[in-house]
Amino acid sequence: MGIALQIIDIAAASIPPDLRSARVERVNLKIGKLSAVVADSLRFCFDIASKDTPLAGAELAIEETPVVARCKDCDARWTIAEPVFTCQACNSGALEILSGRELDIVSIEIAEEGGNEAGGG
Amino acid sequence: MKPVEDKKPTREVRVVSRVLAVNERMAEQNRRRFAEKGVFVINVMSSPGSGKTTTLQKTLERLMPEVRAAVIVGDVSTTHDADRLAVTGAPVVQVNTDAFGGDCHLAAHVIEKAADDIDLEAVELLIVENVGNLVCPAEFDIGEDARVVVLSVTEGEDKPVKYPTMFRTCDAAILNKIDLLPHLDYDKAQAVAYIRQVNPAMPVFEISARTGAGIEAWIAWLREKIRTKLKVEG
């Protein structure tokens, strides 16, 4: 829930001033497979917490990033599918996690009103 | 035939921000504050019912008064854990997260506030007993020096591989309730193997908080950590 609230804060603050009244259709997120986030729970919390905010009704589009590790001993790189954190090549346990811990907001998508009804001025 | 996706036209606004950037900044602030005051901070996490509170009670009994300690206890509600820990004589601050929306974890700003109620000058060790949960707390840095996960033999052996983020981000694991092993079908070797699979270098302390078995090794590890930090900061 804390994570959903942060997403709403950051996304709401990112709406350009001239589009304050427009609807946010989508929030694009990048979430690593090794982050402690369960997509369905996050969507559930987001839907509840976004009520009465500019984000109400927006969809969370989640791109999952794989866990990529590098062995500090032999420099091998590979994608970790199962939770096994030892080097496939040399069996070392000294790994650097290159990706998979992301929990980032990439962008928000705001509805374009059909015509060009702005422009007055 | 209309294979075109029915997507409304949208304007994309780039954001590119870490979702937890605010928490991370606050955690760094906490870390600096604790370093200035010469306080070693451990963040203790587990699923509910693993014996965290009893383990900490026994830990405080062995460390105090030689090590001056204080505790911040997080629960969604009630002060039961704080009441149990207060018996040790350590100052205890209870945080109920229902005041913060019923959160399932302690965030850095909550720790910042709770620490205001502790005389940090008079303390060398601050133990944070996080909310019982193996998921979210892993994601929230609170400004700690070390993270410890408590697991008990009445849970599944495969917890470490089910919650790899938690076990990857911790510095030590405590396997509690080993006094119950004779009554269970628990495969302890398998559980330790799973921990090593996720975090090969992590020390695992097999203890019974109830009987005190194995607890000395854990205490020795913790003492060493405290000593190292306090020495560095002189």
Image (tube, rainbow, N blue to C red):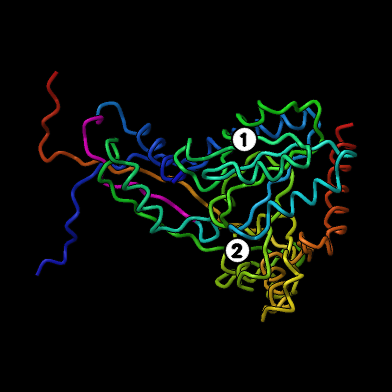
Asked if the stretch drawn in magenta spans residue A38, the answer is no
* Residue at the (67%, 63%) spot, across then down: B151
Q: Horizontal placement of A50 versus B92: left or right?
A: left
Q: Are marks 1 and 2 on the same chain?
A: yes
Q: Range of the magenta residues?
A: A19-31
Amino acid type, residue under disc 1 in the picture: Ile
Name the residue tied to disc 1. Answer: B111
User: Circle 1 sits in a helix, a strand or a loop, which is it?
Assistant: helix
Residue B155: x, y in percent?
Answer: 62, 69
The reply, left or right, for residue B157 in relation to residue A114 is: right
Height in image: B21 above or below B212?
above
In the image, which disc is placed on residue B154? none
Q: Quadrant of residue A120?
A: top left
Residue B194 drawn at (x, y percent): 67, 72
Let me know if residue A24 is in the magenta part.
Answer: yes
Density class for disc 1 (Cα within 10 Å; few <14, some 14-19, many ≥20) is many
Instruction: Point out the residue furthest to the bottom here.
Output: B185
Q: Which mark is residue B164?
A: 2
Marked residue chain, label 1: B
Pick whichever of labels 1 and 2 is earlier in the sequence: 1
Question: What whole-number distance in Å separates the C-alpha atoms at marks 1 and 2?
Answer: 25 Å
Q: Quadrant of residue B230?
A: top right
Name the amino acid type tagged 2. Pro
Parent chain of label 2: B
Q: Secondary structure at mark 2?
A: helix
Quarter location, residue B11: top left
Residue farthest to the top, as pictured = A121
> For mark 2, does the 10 Å Cα neighbourhood hold few (<14), some (14 to 19), or many (20 or more) residues?
many
